[in-house]
């Protein structure tokens, strides 16, 4: 398959079941809601070392938030429910509770309830106040700038993590420009996050390493500087490869995000140095969710 | 199917215990069986059809017409469905209601919504003392749901209240929110003496400056984020509380009752 001069490899991305949740952070203005959201989703690119994968889903208008203030929707993904609950609580406590004017609300009503502000209330040292409003339980925690308002719980649901595609380009600037275009479009898709910095990862990994202590190492087959030294998957004109990783609430959500992302890359096309789109997998033996590139773009 | 309607034939000299006539107890019964139910009236036990004309079939939608203040325990332990009362109601209206709704066009007496667990009670007239309170000797009053009173309420509204909300468009008598454990009482009118007497936690939301006891301390003026959400939750109600002009988020906060735990608050509109 070739779209606008870009070859779409006959391969697939392989993804895994994860647990996910969503929270809504509001503040006096969008600037401070975003600051809090960025703090809460920081150091959360990969479950391998961060404990979770998190990202900003989108900015919310005042009409879309529970308290009528500007807000940001964030999502957190983890391999298990306990890990997710722990990450949510510690991040909320250190990054939202601390952030000026912030309030924190559930972003998912369905699924299993997990603590959002339920335990953060103890920061109030007995001065905290519970309020049940329209069937939902909230906590008002006195803090130095006034009150921190938080919903007690949010929902945890089954999700999919690890959808991905690779952008193979003739130069590093061209690969990055294509990925930026893809991310811009993908961020318009609901229910997905791209957890790596700016949504793009340049250090794709393979399973295993020559060093026994490491479970993963650089994906040498896609490293352009190793083309003559290893069993490469790159043709001579490829000088840079970048990857976009997607976590979503369902396979369909990731399908959609991959489609708009790959399309944005292909719109730049061969004329802008984009040569191929590929994807990372483990031979289909590890992850139950397979995203076949040519089927997605058909 | 039309609403099951009990129309009082004539005012009774004695008080009537109406607690058997709730939706869940009448479900599946035919009119003859309902007519044969005996109600306690003074020391007598007359049949329902001796006191009421009965029309309609829908046991989940009950109307009590020509009602008087002698009809006690209307909607006691109601667990779904609706009861509409045209006229006045006696004491213990909606006592321990678990779910469903009760609407009253007139006034009601003592202990309306006492120990209420959930649901909605709307009183278009006035309510007596101990609205949403605890029965004598009990330690917990209303535990959930919403009570809306368009008129005035008597003394000790929300006594021992544990959760839920009492919304009063008119005035509240003395000891409003006394011994309150938690929950919200909103009063658009004036409040009497000893507001929040011995309250431990909970919120008294007032439109007018009250006369506060010395055991309530001024915590300053504040903009509170939960208030717009609270007012938004009133939108479905047929009430002045639902009007956008009623909403505010800037309040003077008083903490108390310091003679008790002192974690309660009186919020007065600024």
Image (cartoon, coloured by chain):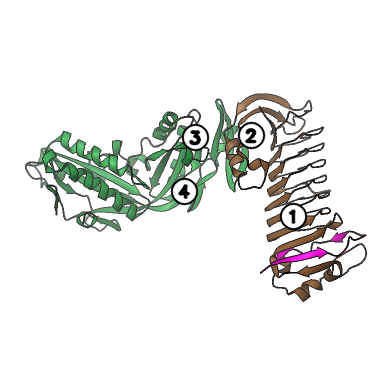
Q: Which mark is residue A126?
A: 2
Comes first in the chain, label 4 or label 2: 4
Q: Which residues are magenta?
A: B1-23
Comes first in the chain, label 3 or label 2: 3
SS at mark 1 in the image: loop
Distance in Å between CA atoms under marks 1 and 3: 38 Å
Check if residue B155 falls in the magenta segment: no
Residue A158 appears in the figure: yes
Residue A208 appears in the figure: no
Residue pointed to by mark 3: A69
Q: Which mark is residue A38?
A: none
CB within 8 Å, label 1 to label 3? no
Residue pointed to by mark 4: A108
Same-subunit check for callouts 1 and 2: no
Q: Chain of mark 1?
A: B
SS at mark 2 in the image: loop
CB within 8 Å, label 3 to label 2? no
């Amino acid at each position: 398959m070739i779209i606008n001069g870009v070859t779409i490899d006959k391969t697939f991305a392989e993804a895994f079941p994860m647990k996910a949740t969503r929270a809504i952070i509001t503040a006096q203005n969008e600037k401070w809601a975003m600051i809090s959201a960025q703090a809460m989703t920081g150091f959360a690119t990969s479950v391998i070392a961060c404990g979770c994968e998190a990202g900003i889903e989108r900015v919310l208008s005042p009409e879309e938030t529970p308290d009528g203030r500007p807000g940001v929707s964030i999502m957190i993904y983890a391999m298990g429910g306990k890990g997710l609950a722990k990450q949510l609580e510690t991040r909320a406590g250190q990054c939202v509770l601390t952030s000026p004017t912030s309030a924190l609300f559930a972003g998912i009503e369905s699924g299993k309830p997990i603590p959002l502000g339920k335990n953060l209330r103890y920061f109030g040292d007995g001065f905290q106040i519970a309020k049940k409003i329209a069937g939902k339980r909230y906590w008002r925690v006195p803090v130095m700038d006034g009150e921190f308002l938080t919903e007690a719980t949010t929902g945890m649901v089954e999700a999919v993590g690890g959808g991905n595609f690779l952008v193979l380009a003739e130069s590093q600037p061209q690969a990055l420009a294509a990925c930026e275009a893809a991310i811009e479009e993908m961020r318009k898709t609901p229910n997905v996050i791209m957890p790596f910095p700016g949504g793009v990862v340049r250090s794709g990994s393979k399973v295993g390493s020559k060093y026994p202590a490491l479970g993963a190492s650089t994906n040498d087959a896609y490293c352009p500087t190793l083309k003559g030294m290893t069993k490469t998957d790159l043709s001579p004109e490829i000088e840079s490869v970048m990857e976009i990783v997607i976590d979503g609430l369902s396979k369909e959500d990731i399908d959609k995000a991959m489609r708009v992302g790959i399309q944005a890359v292909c719109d730049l096309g061969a004329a802008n140095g984009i040569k191929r789109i590929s994807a990372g997998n483990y031979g289909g033996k590890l992850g139950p969710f397979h995203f076949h590139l040519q089927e997605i773009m058909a | 199917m039309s609403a099951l309607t009990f129309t009082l034939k004539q005012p009774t000299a004695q008080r009537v215990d109406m607690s058997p006539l709730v939706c869940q107890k009448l479900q599946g019964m035919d009119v003859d069986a309902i007519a044969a139910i005996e109600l306690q009236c003074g020391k007598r036990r007359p049949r329902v059809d001796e006191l009421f004309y009965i029309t309609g079939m829908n046991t989940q939608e009950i109307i009590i017409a020509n009602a008087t203040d002698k009809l006690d325990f209307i909607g006691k332990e109601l667990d779904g469905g609706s009861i509409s009362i045209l006229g006045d109601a006696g004491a213990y209206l909606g006592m321990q209601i678990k779910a469903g709704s009760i609407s009253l066009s007139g006034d009601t007496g003592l202990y309306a919504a006492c120990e209420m667990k959930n649901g909605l009670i709307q009183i278009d007239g006035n309510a007596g003392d101990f609205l949403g309170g605890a029965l004598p000797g009990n330690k917990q009053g209303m535990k959930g749901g919403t009570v809306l009173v368009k008129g005035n309420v008597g003394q000790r509204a929300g006594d021992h209240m544990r959760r839920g909300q009492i919304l009063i468009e008119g005035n509240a008598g003395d000891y409003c929110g006394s011994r309150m454990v938690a929950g919200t009482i909103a009063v658009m009118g004036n409040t009497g003496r000893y507001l929040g007497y011995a309250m431990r936690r909970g919120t008294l939301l007032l439109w007018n400056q009250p006369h506060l006891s010395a055991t309530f301390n001024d915590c300053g003026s504040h903009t509170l984020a939960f208030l717009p959400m609270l007012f938004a939750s009133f939108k479905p109600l047929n009430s002045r509380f639902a009007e956008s002009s009623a909403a505010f988020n800037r309040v003077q906060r008083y903490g108390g009752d310091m003679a008790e735990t002192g974690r309660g608050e009186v919020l007065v509109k600024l």
